[in-house]
Image (cartoon, rainbow, N blue to C red):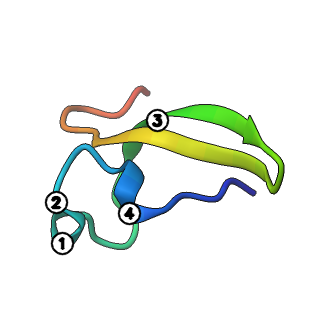
Amino acid sequence: EIFFHESGLEIAPEILQEGAWVLYDVEETFKGPEATDLEAYIGELPA
């Protein structure tokens, strides 16, 4: 499980919808892994 906060988004939070694919980096924090630099993934998914 990876935590993220909307302050880590590179896009407006309202653009993301449930089930959207995103790209992100993971940083280890004192609370556990946290996703940073989130971006919406636009393109075809790998087969």
Q: Is residue 6 above or below residue 21?
A: below
Estimate the x, y position of residue 6 in percent, counting from the top left: 38, 63
Q: CA distance from mark 3 to mark 2?
A: 15 Å
Give percent across and percent down for residue 47.
43, 27
Image quarter in which the N terminus is found: bottom right
4 vs 3, front mark: 4
- The answer to whether marks 2 and 1 mark residues whose Cβ atoms lie closer than 8 Å is yes
The image shows residue 47, relative to residue 7, as above or below, that is: above
Kind of element beneath mark 1: helix
Residue at image mark 1: 14
Q: Can you give x and y, in whole percent of width and height, for residue 30 in the image? A: 83, 49
What amino acid type should be assigned to the residue bearing mark 2?
Ala
Mark 3 — residue?
24
Q: Residue at x 54, y 58 (%)?
A: 4
- Residue occupying the point 32% across, 50% down: 9
**What residue would you read off at disc 4?**
6
Secondary structure state at the residue bearing disc 4: helix
Q: Residues within 10 Å of mark 4 (few under 14, many from 20)?
A: few
Query: Closer to the N terminus: mark 3 or mark 2?
Result: 2
Residue identified by numbered label 2: 12
Amino acid carrying mark 3 in the image: Tyr
